[in-house]
Image (cartoon, grey):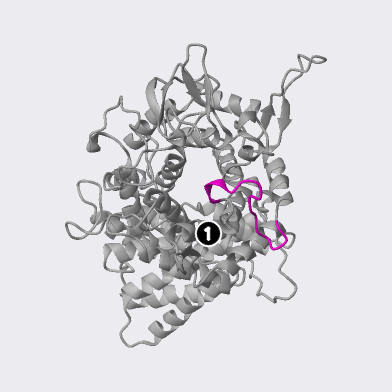
Amino acid sequence: MTLLPFAPFVLFASLVSCAAAAIAPTTAPVPQEQTLPTRTQGTILKGDVDTLVEAIAAQTNKPGSAAPYVPTIDGAARMLCAMGHCHRYYVAVDHPRIRATLGMLIAGRRDDGSFGATAGEDPMTTAWVVDAMTVMDAERYRDEIQTAKKWLAGQGIEGSPFAGSVAETMAQLRADVFPEHIAQATVAAAAKLRESTAFDLAEGVALLVRLVACQQANRDLDAVAASTQGAVSFAPEQKKAFDYLMAQLHDGTMLVQFGEQKVADPAITAIALLALLTKPAPLRTQAEGAALDTGVHWLLSCQNEDGSFGKQLQNYTTSVAVGALLRWGMPPAKPAIEKAQRYILACQHAEQDGYEKGDRDYGSIGYGGSQRGDLSNVNFALQALRESGLPAEHEAFQKALVFLQRSQNLKNVNDFRGKVSDPDAGGKIMEIEAGNDGGSGYYPGNSAAGYDATPDGKSHPRSYGSMTYALLKSYTLCGLPSSDPRVQAAVLWISQNWTLDENPGFTAPLGDKARQAGLYYYYMVLAQALDLAKVEVVHQRKAADPKAPDALPEPIEWKKALRARIISLQQADGSFVNEKNARWMESMHVLCTCYALLALERCR
């Protein structure tokens, strides 16, 4: 599915909300040692837009007649779209030339509902015509708009190209760069064009669209600044962690020890960029933005021909890289994301690789290639697929559900049973069947938290926190509603095992150290899962109190509780580290700090 132009998963509304934080006087105060420009509120660029509209109109003006502004359908559509969205909000009845231009567009309508003067014209032309008719007279052209949208959907195209232009403008915002600053190069180019003896209409229209996109971006910032819902901040603790990670960057990359050398690593760089990009673009300085741009361009250079990133753990690396590229949100990322999406889909164990639905690994995704699938890789992959535009109805999510059910300890949906080896116990053979507490292990028949024996000599893998949250997150990404019994069972396990002191599920025989394994990963996936599933309050179900056996579950505002817990663990330099258990690389300050920032992002 193509979004025109490229619209990042950092949703436009979210970006606008974050921009409001940069300009609202009560949020995100600028450090005293910096003197940053302030944003001009209200309508900007009025004179520049008016002058350019007149200059374009003068090129095709014919005394005594109403001629279209631009003689090409594509250019005319863009011109009308810009006029309709600019500060004067032109509509069809405002000028005979607007009506003449709309008439030319209608004359270029083909039998299939698309628009263009020649067969095989760029589908973008039809998208711009839809935008133009919508802003000029949506009621009059309702049928034409609906038919054209159906045609565009058949081409895999959705969205408004003008809205995409505004989103591209918003993506360039920084703490010291606002729409009026972004527009200056366009203002200069328009002035140069007006002075030229050979006025290029196509260039003039393109410049007009960019100027009006800046006007619209500024209006959107005004609207959100006035809204009580627009007050989004980047807390001091987040800034401290952000500053720590920024200090670890080397030309935009993160280095890891490889033999006697330190080399830039795609996987660690990708998750670091993903975490750093949680700082809203409008709050970043120009220097910070430039450093992150350098890192993203380096990451883009690490993409392989098959769409993957890096040379090892490629599904994990690729999935995280997709997240970073989407957050970056600039046009050069679009083809890389599309290739990466195809790679991730190819990693899924399904019929194309000889898997049958009865196979334990069916529907899963592992670290890459033919490697066994697991719930950790699956939740990262599903997130990358959904956020890059793959709809929940896609067969990949339906196949993933087969794997997810077999990972869940829920007997009425988990059909996996039989003899398997335990890779953590030297390949010891066990007879496995599912438990029934609603939580999840690592993959069907396997759990890093160990196993519980049943009376008949079988074993079932213990459910534990990080993978149960990964299960809930994955179910949500696959489109399951909160009313689904599988989702409800996972939420019930969470309510019965709620804690922020440890990664729950690791039982006493494994020791206290085991309970701290993967703690920061646990915080991150907990926040992602509950936020995606729209769970605002966890109803903690404690062991029955003999004095109050009918006591109601205790409501926990998890965002507030998680934020307080993570902040309490922050080191003096702004970093985080798992001091009690280094398992799963949590002895790395950089990795734990990334996990912490990604969790805090969801705790607003």
- Asked if residue 86 lies left or right of residue 594, the reply is left
Q: Does the magenta stretch include residue 142?
A: no
Which of 496 and 532 lies nearest the eye of the viewer? 496
- Can residue 96 be seen here? The reply is no
Which of 84 and 284 lies nearest the eye of the viewer? 284
Characterize the magenta stretch by its predominant secondary structure.
loop
* Residue, disc 1: 272
Q: Is residue 135 above or below residue 527?
A: below
Which of 216 and 559 lies nearest the eye of the viewer? 559
Residue plotted at (46% across, 20% down)? 434
Quadrant in the rendering for residue 528: top right
Task: Please report the bounds of the magenta region as a residue range.
Answer: 571-585
The residue carrying pointer 1 sits among few (fewer than 14), some (14 to 19) or many (20 or more) residues within 10 Å by Cα, namely many
Q: In this view, does 370 lie above or below 497?
A: below
Residue plotted at (37% across, 36% down)? 364
Residue plotted at (48% across, 67% down)? 253
Name the spot of residue 165 as percent of width and height, x first.
Answer: 43, 62
- Asked if residue 222 lies left or right of residue 112, the reply is right
Q: How many marks?
A: 1
Q: In this view, does 197 lie above or below 64?
A: below
Quadrant in the rendering for residue 178: bottom right
- Can residue 465 be seen here? The reply is yes
Query: Which residue sits furthest top?
Result: 456
Query: Which residue sits furthest right?
Result: 547
Q: What residue type is labelled 1?
A: Ala
Residue plotted at (30% across, 26% down)? 357
Which of 486 and 411 lies nearest the eye of the viewer? 411
Query: Which residue sits furthest left?
Result: 119
Name the spot of residue 154 as percent of width and height, x first.
Answer: 27, 44
Name the spot of residue 250 as percent of width and height, x first.
Answer: 51, 71
Name the spot of residue 243 as percent of width and height, x first.
Answer: 64, 65
Element carrying mark 1: helix
